[in-house]
Image (tube, helix red, strand yellow):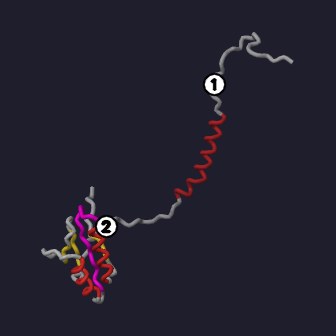
Amino acid sequence: MAMALGNDGDGEDEVNSTINTTPLVDVMLVLLIIFLITSPVVLNSVKVKLPAETNEIYKTKPENITLTIDKEGSMYWNGAQKALSGTDELFEKMKKVSVQIPQPEVHIRGDQNTRYEFVGKTILTIQRAGIAKVGFVIEPPPRN
């Protein structure tokens, strides 16, 4: 039992440098079949007119309360120039307001540099007083 290694001397030492295209054709046919099957699903989607983005200005009701909190943590009731003395005074005012029917909303306008501690204490005081709706007033991002 002999095994032939190397060249038999018949002069065929040339390297076969052709590309085997059979796997490439197989892959391309599979991709073609996948695209033919999935394209009707993509093209036959339900036609829907999507709503356009609108920015409606929120009109505050006169009975709503606006609390402004500056970066030092001072609270201002409905844009007043004099700050509230603390959360105790805020609690007393909120208790009087919370019994009104319908109950007003409280809008918090916090300075961008206000520590969360001040905002958290304010929200806790408002909730303890029994106010159900608390929201934040923010400035919308600029449109480009």
- Judge left or right: residue 65 versus residue 29: left
Kind of residue sitting beneath label 1: Thr
126 or 102: which is nearer to us?
126
Q: Which residue is mark 1?
A: 18
- Judge left or right: residue 44 versus residue 90: right
Relative to 22, residue 76 above or below = below
Q: Which mark is residue 54?
A: 2
- Judge left or right: residue 42 versus residue 26: left
Give the crowd class for mark 2: few <14, some 14-19, many >=20 residues within 10 Å.
few
Q: Residue at x 65, y 18 (%)?
A: 15
Magenta span covers which residues? Answer: 103-116
65 or 47: which is nearer to us?
65
Q: Which secondary structure, mark 2?
A: loop
- Judge left or right: residue 12 versus residue 51: right
Give how far across and how far down residue 138 sits, in percent: 26, 67
61 or 77: which is nearer to us?
77
Q: Which secondary structure, mark 1?
A: loop
Give how far across and how far down residue 52 sits, in percent: 35, 65
